[in-house]
Amino acid sequence: MSSVIQVVPLTSNVGARIEGVDLHADVDADDIEQIRRALWHYSVLVFAGQRLDAGEHSRLTSFFGSLAPLEIFTFLGNSNPGLAIDPRKGGTVSSDGKSGRPVGFEKPPAVKASADALHPVSEFAGWHTDSSFTRRLPQAAALRAEVIPPVGGDTTFSSLCAAYEALSPTMQGWLQGIQALHVVPPGYKNAIKIWQYGEDAEARFDAEYQPREHPVVIEHPETGRKALFVNPGYTHRIVGMTDRESASMLRFLYDHITQPEFVYRHHWSEPGDVVVWDELVCLHRAPNDFRPHERRLVRLTAGQVAPNPPTRQSTMIG
Ligand code: SIN
């Protein structure tokens, strides 16, 4: 029997809390469909205090597509869709303050690769879309809090649909048809501990992940909503512009997409919260403001989706 699910908006542009569903029990197809539609509409869903175990976390994530790791991990030969996000087990990420790119990962001691283990990674302090330099992104990601710090450690999400929709028609029209180049930033290979994947892993990775063009305006496959698709983590330049023009345009777009109006900030008030987001149309970031405390989240990803340009008139689901 279906539960009475309530979808409670958290801001006017992004995020909703899902109430009235017990994720420890079987969730029927109608409820799953309602939850999926809520994700495509609100871009971020919060399931508060559910205290899911690993299996229940996987089941929830699979509502949004088949469990699958980021494309880079599949390419490197690791099929585990889970990431343990725990700064004690990885390097550190900082921003150079100019380009906003992640730089300066410290090389942590080598750890033995295990296809069964979660990949431990450092925290992600800058706004990004996960590995947008790849062909396809996960459709959705689900974070489960295991250890939350007494201060800081929130995760923030920004709606790229709301950001697009707030632009003037002139700017929207101008950006359509423009491409941007997405690249692997300095320090990325250390952050994923590429040496774990074999002696030839770095050469294979470099050959595969050359700079990749994606449209600056994309269309969500489920809703038809348009979204801006650039991020300070991996977007290198706008194609067909001079360096100065591209840098100015990206500065404007980054400033625009991270305005507080488009942002939901999730405070992990109790271990057991689960937050799901739509990877294609949300930036996310985890400010590095909780040290020296412990923070451990587990992230699962599901589905695969390519950032495609608009093919139809923008429509929104109700
Ligand atoms: C990430 O998935 O990029 C990290 C999110 C977090 O640590 O809160």
Image: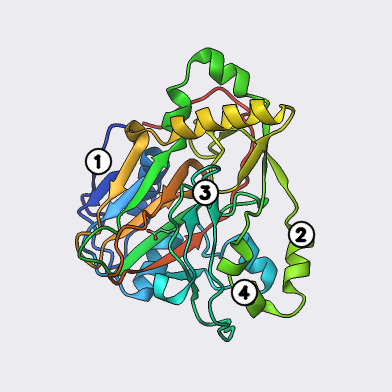
Farthest residue, direction top = 170
Q: Earlier in the sequence, mark 2 or mark 4?
A: 4
Front position among marks 2 and 4:
2
Residue 236 lies, in percent from the top left, at 64, 42
Q: Specify which label sits upstream in the sequence, 3 or 1.
A: 1
**In which quadrant of the rendered image does the N terminus lie?**
bottom left
Disc 3 is placed on an element classified as: loop
Specify the quadrant of the image occupied by residue 84: bottom left
Distance from Cα at disc 2 to Cα at disc 3: 19 Å
Image marks 4 and 1: residues in contact by CB distance under 8 Å? no
**Would residue 318 be visible to someone looking at this image?**
yes
Please name the residue that numbered disc 3 is placed on: 129
Name the colour scheme: rainbow
Which residue lies under the disc numbered 2?
A: 208
Residue 101: x, y in percent?
A: 55, 49
Mark 3 burial class by Cα count in 10 Å: few <14, some 14-19, many 20+: many
Viewport quadrant of the C terminus: top left
> Which mark is first along the chain, 3 or 2?
3
Provide the residue designation for mark 1. Answer: 10
